[in-house]
Amino acid sequence: MTTYSISEMSSEFKITPRTLRFYEEKGLLTPSRQGRSRIYDASDRVRLELILRGKRLGFSLEESCDIIDMYDPTGNNLDQLEKVTATVRMKIIQLKQQQRDLKRMLRELKTWEDNYLKAIQGLTKVNSGEPAKHARVTP
């Protein structure tokens, strides 16, 4: 049976040992012990990989763990697959809304930037001796 130390797991997944200990404290990983050393097995490695994948996809730890814990090596895992599908669909809806919100914010910021640049140009002309135009800028 292949095993991994905390430093091997940290290095492979580019996370800190503290992160591994955090996941252990939360009950997400259950390494065995040899004295004070943590010994991770293949199932810990797979769980960590799935947790980190879920994190990259925007899943909460709870969402990831609920899905991972549903896995049954003896079953067809239909419930797990349906749960993953529903969670992914919700993430897609959330991300599309965030995308719309970000586009709206970018348009608004661009408008304000343009207004401020016009105000700066107006003030620059005043300082260069041209007749003053009142630059009105409101946030």
Image (cartoon, grey):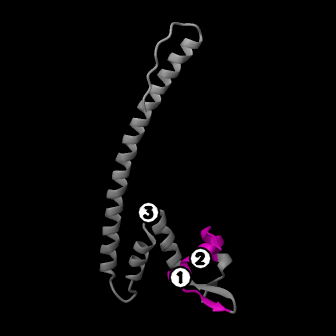
Q: Quadrant of residue 41?
A: bottom right
Furthest residue in direction bottom, as rendered: 35
Q: How many marks?
A: 3
Circle 2 — which element? Answer: helix
Residue behind mark 1 = 29
Residue found 39% across the figure and 76% down from its top: 67
Q: Is residue 97 above or below residue 60?
A: above
Instruction: Report the quarter where the C terminus lies.
Output: top left
Q: Position of residue 66 (x, y in %)?
A: 39, 78
Circle 3 — which element? Answer: loop
Instruction: Report the quarter where the N terminus lies.
Output: bottom right
> Circle 1: is it few (<14), some (14-19), or many (20+) Cα within 10 Å?
many
Residue behind mark 2 = 20
Residue found 33% across the figure and 52% down from its top: 97
**Is the residue under label 1 in contact with that under label 2 (CB below 8 Å)?**
yes
For badge 3, the amino acid type reads Gly
How many angstroms separate mark 2 from mark 1 (CA)? 8 Å
Residue nearest the viewer, comparing 69 with 73: 69
Residue found 44% across the figure and 26% down from its top: 137
How many angstroms separate mark 3 from mark 1 (CA)? 20 Å
Residue found 60% across the figure and 78% down from its top: 21
Residue nearest the viewer, comparing 40 with 112: 112
Magenta segment range?
A: 9-34
Q: Position of residue 88 (x, y in %)?
A: 35, 65
Residue nearest the viewer, comparing 17 with 78: 17
Q: Is residue 66 magenta?
A: no
For badge 1, the amino acid type reads Leu
Indicate which disc, 2 or 1, sits on the residue closer to the N terminus: 2
Residue 58 has which mark?
3
